[in-house]
Image: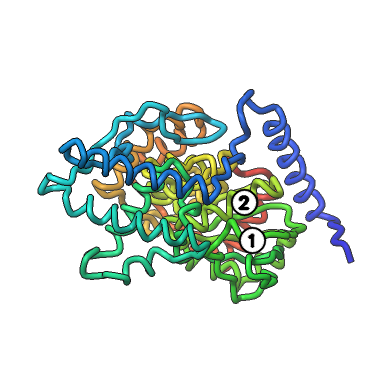
Amino acid sequence: MAFVPTGPEASFFDALDRHRASLLAVVKQGTGKAPAGVTRVVSSSEVLTSIENIIQDIIKSLARNEVPAFTIDSRSSWENIMFEDSVGLQMIPQCITRKIKSDSPKSVKKFALILKILSMIYKLVQSNTYATKRDIYYTDSQLFGNQAAVDNIIDDISCMLKVPRRSLHVLSTSKGLIAGNLRYMEEDGTRVQCTCSATATAVPSNIQGIRNLITDAKFLLIVEKDATFQRLLDDNFCSRMSPCIMVTGKGIPDLNTRLLVKKLWDTFHLPVFTLVDADPHGIEIMCIYKYGSMSMSFEAHSLTVPAIRWLGLLPSDIKRLNIPKGSLIPLTKHDHMKLDSILRRPYISCQPFWRKEMEMMADSKMKAEIQALTFLSSDYLSRVYLPNKLRFGGWI
């Protein structure tokens, strides 16, 4: 039977429908450029050809008695980043590059590792098989040294080839969870039905492969921390505010969680809200979902959801709800540095309300975790705070 809201719930769903309509109007109006959700599809033959061209360049360098080197766009420089409000942070066309030379003591090992992983990717794409980054690491853990080295090289290769990482047939092990009103089919034909129960569904490892997504959800809620996500499930928040979808990346989101949020937005254009701690770390995580990160800016079109709204916990909520100082935490030196860094980023100029909230935090020299709301009551977050925020449009 179809869900027909009545009473207070009707005003809540009406508010969300109005918000959704305004988002769709922005999407339809556009900016005269390709929509942010449109990502160039890269065929296997294109990936293979790109790798072959790189290897041919190495052979030509050797034939000319020149030192072979990989030229890679620098993913750690703000000089290579531009901001567009419909996409987020993305790399500029002509980037500052760095060379990974085969004759330099500092880079010879990385040169060899890039060459090795390129050969592994070539075999994966050629055979139409997939491997996780963890699988690649364990093919020769002593050679690679640590998982982070493999992760970084795979991102460098993706950036160098100018193709999305999933086109390399390399998958990440997901850490995120999803719950609520959503059904879909995985690439192998497995049907998945997410529920509002206390047991959430793991985010799939191959987001590109999922299809036949179905939902009646009115909104998507991104929850920063796993503990808060589980508490909301235990309090039956999903059922109480049904139909909805909840996602958590358990802190800084992995690639698959970001891809899933992007896919849900592209498919359904649901209002998307974030629930994060009122601290610089929480704001940083929200910014990653909304505008992307500097290190993955080369893949911004397939990862960012600029329509995301900040639902809570807002620094202004701390004062409004009279949360006692004993429930707050002083900002550390690192917090102040992170806050200053975020305030200097290009997207803050188009978010005056965000700036006001962050300046309020800086002035108070205090931060708060979402758990601070338990001072009011153990289920205040799920029973009062979130329903009122969603019903009365308490987001920015």
Mark 1, residues whose alpha carbon is within 10 Å: few (<14), some, or many (≥20)? Answer: many
- Residue drawn 50% across the image and 52% down it: 167
User: Which amino acid type corresponds to the residue marked 2 in the rendered image?
Assistant: Lys
Mark 2, residues whose alpha carbon is within 10 Å: few (<14), some, or many (≥20)? Answer: many
Visible residue check, residue 319? no
Asked which secondary structure carries label 2, the reply is helix
Asked which secondary structure carries label 1, the reply is loop
Q: Contact, CB < 8 Å: mark 1 with mark 2?
A: yes
- Left or right of 222 on screen, residue 255: left
| Camera-side residue of 134 and 280 | 134
Residue 223 appears at what percent x and percent y?
A: 53, 58
- Residue drawn 79% across the image and 46% down it: 14
Quadrant placement of the N terminus: bottom right
Residue 160 appears at what percent x and percent y?
A: 37, 42
- Gap in Å between the C-alphas at discs 1 and 2? 10 Å
- Residue drawn 38% across the image and 40% down it: 294
Visible residue check, residue 73? yes
**Which disc, if any, is residue 307?**
none
The residue indicated by pointer 1 is 210
| Camera-side residue of 211 and 118 | 118
The residue indicated by pointer 2 is 263
Mark 1 or mark 2, whichever is nearer to me: 1
- Looking at the rendered structure, the number of numbered marks drawn on it comes to 2
Residue 183 falls in image quadrant:
bottom right
Task: Return the residue found at the far top.
Answer: 32
Residue 165 appears at what percent x and percent y?
A: 46, 51
Residue 233 appears at what percent x and percent y?
A: 60, 70
- Left or right of 321 on screen, residue 152: left
User: Which amino acid type corresponds to the residue marked 1 in the rendered image?
Assistant: Ile
Residue 116 falls in image quadrant:
bottom left
Residue 198 falls in image quadrant:
bottom right
